Image (cartoon, rainbow, N blue to C red):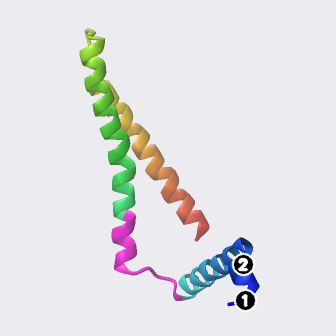
Amino acid sequence: MSADDKSPQGNGAAQIERKAARKIKARREGRHSIWFGFGMFGLIGWAVAVPTLIGVALGLWLDRVAPTSFSWTLALIVAGVCLGCWNAWRWVSQERSDD
């Protein structure tokens, strides 16, 4: 093991080199495996589900603490879905531009 391998910069450079090699290989092959597709669906699903669940939890709490003529839960579910869809769209468009 050389001195470069022990330094944080040596590890970072090696990690960047591995990522660059993977990216070049993926561009050369030109297609993704089915596992990449499943992973993409999972990330998009979580990107929408997490803000929605946060909206549900916050809405239920607000309905108990500050009752109003409208449902906080329903309003925050809609807001969470919208935020999650925007987040997923932004992530997918960024991944597409990186390719």
- Residue identifier under label 1: 2
Left of 79 or right of it: where is 96? right
Label 1 packing within 10 angstroms: few (<14), some (14-19), many (20+): few
Q: Tell me which amino acid carries mark 1.
A: Ser
Relative side of 89 to 9, left or right: left
Q: Nearer the viewer, residue 97 or 21?
A: 21
Q: Is residue 98 above or below residue 7?
A: above
Q: Are marks 2 and 1 in contact (CB under 8 Å)?
A: yes
- Residue range in magenta is 29-40
Return the residue at label 2.
Answer: 10
Q: Tell me if 29 is positioned left or right of 16 in this view.
A: left
Residue 61: x percent and y percent? Answer: 28, 23
Give neighbour class at mark 2: few <14, some 14-19, many 20+ (Cα, 10 Å): some
Q: Residue at x 25, y 25 (%)?
A: 60
Does 91 appear above or below 12?
Answer: above
Residue 6: image location, x then y, percent: 69, 79
Earlier-in-chain disc, 2 versus 1: 1
Q: Between residue 49 and residue 66, name the one nearer to us.
A: 66
Residue visible at 34% across and 78% down in the picture = 34
